[in-house]
Image: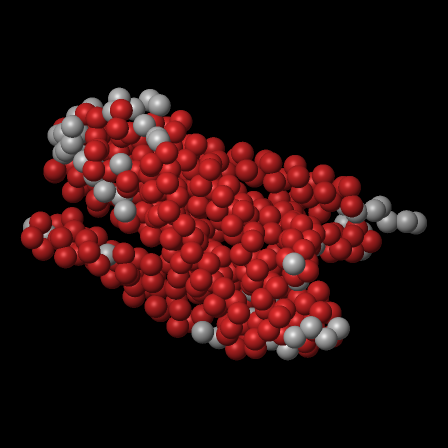
Amino acid sequence: MLYLKLTVRNAGRSFVDYLLYIAAMTILTAVIEVSVCIAVKGDAAGFQTVSLPLLVTVIQIVLAGYMDNFMLRQRAKEFASYLLLGMEKERLSRLFLCEVFLIGLCCFAAGTGIGFAAYGLWSLGQPLEVMKPDAVLYGKSVSAAFLCFGLMEIICCLRLKKRLRKLQIRELMNERRHSQSAQDAGEYQRWGLCFFLCFSCFLGLVCGIVFLPPDWSVYFVSIVAIPLLLSILAFYQWVFGCFYALRKRKAVSIYQKDRLYIIANSTSHFRTAAVTNTVFCICLLFSACSYSTGRLMLHPAFSGFDRTAKQWMGTAQLSICMVFLVIYFSILSLQQMIESRQQAKDDIIMRYLGRSGSQITKLIRWQIAIRLTSPMIMTALVIVCSIPLLNSKMNRLLPNSMRHILLTAGAEFWVCILLFYLCYFGMVSVMSRSKTTGSSPSPKS
């Protein structure tokens, strides 16, 4: 009971540090709940979407792993104090894991509630009565979602427990200042070569899908995701490694204006940033695929399914696209807000060094823009290189009234991206500016 109270108290005190974790896990659990509801009722609409919960679970596992590491850095000195006061490392591990699991249960409860409510509102406009939510559907969907949640929690807890066992007090005291070393950055040239090879392979497979007969192209479709994912990871490892190497070479150009501060802030944990940008890029590509599929199914000339199934499936795909866009921009914005809070002392120092409030605000806006934009770079490259080829293939298969449907869907998707970007950039800029002006004192003469 004492440790339960301590766990609840620590979770409450560290709510701001858990904010990113709570937002991400709640939204992703809601997506799993909606997708499981669709999967349970999928036979009635003539389709299956069982793979979506598994995909979201994989994304959850990756994001939760890095969020757990982030929270460990936030709480490092607190844990070191517990160890100095005589608490056993095994007991400390159980305390932290129980805290993470308790937060996860709250996210699961909130996420399944939000997801089932969204499914209920969604199904009101559907003509099929079998699609209406009920208690049986809720029980089945929550049970299936709990299996995904349990898998994610078990994997993340085992990985986190293994790391906690290896940590020493000295490492905990210096955990916040830990960053990747220059030795890691020396691999960026190999990552660059890997990127060009994998991306060339990806484009070759896309060309095979477009120009080869269906009997051959079906094999290319089944493996095209492998070089795509590898090329995304290699690209961001290469880019962040290049910037880190440039900073280490101390080139004169990076000392001009605010380049050194921006590059140092972006590359202090360049390997983690590369993996994080890879995950968000994949999230963005998945959103683009969902939007294109939804637009294709909702087109009046599309005759692949009956009218009811087309309406349901198209609406589902467009809704999934919007959900993933919210996930993308919300999590990146929360990350920026947390970093802005951590860098409050840096803002104060810059004021004492003579930087004005407008200059600091401009610097913060650059950081927000870089964080929101960097995962879009590889997304734009993939779409620009593959959509025209795939569009030519679709033009040969679809009626004339649906010509250039992929190009139209791609343009509409980037309009959505622009609207989301402007809204979130404006909100984060206003919040960061108010925090900076409210916490940073003016230099005294």
In the rendered image, the vertical position of residue 43 relative to residue 251, given as above or below: above
38 or 298, nearer to the observer: 38
In the rendered image, the vertical position of residue 285 relative to residue 162, given as above or below: above
Residue that appears at 47% across and 56% down? 63
311 with respect to 29 (left or right): left
Can residue 155 be seen?
yes
26 or 281, nearer to the observer: 26
Looking at this rendering, what residue extends furthest in the right direction?
445
Residue 372 in picture, x, y percent from top left: 51, 46
Residue 310 in picture, x, y percent from top left: 22, 30
In the rendered image, the vertical position of residue 317 relative to residue 333, given as above or below: above
335 or 77, nearer to the observer: 77
187 or 97, nearer to the observer: 97
Residue that appears at 67% across and 50% down? 12
Dividing the image into 4 quarters, which one contains the N terminus?
A: bottom right
Residue 52 in picture, x, y percent from top left: 32, 47
Quarter residue 68 falls in: bottom right
Residue that appears at 40% across and 69% down? 191
Residue 126 in picture, x, y percent from top left: 29, 24
375 with respect to 307 (left or right): right
In the rendered image, the vertical position of residue 111 relative to residue 76, given as above or below: above
Residue that appears at 78% across and 41% down? 438
354 with respect to 417 (left or right): right
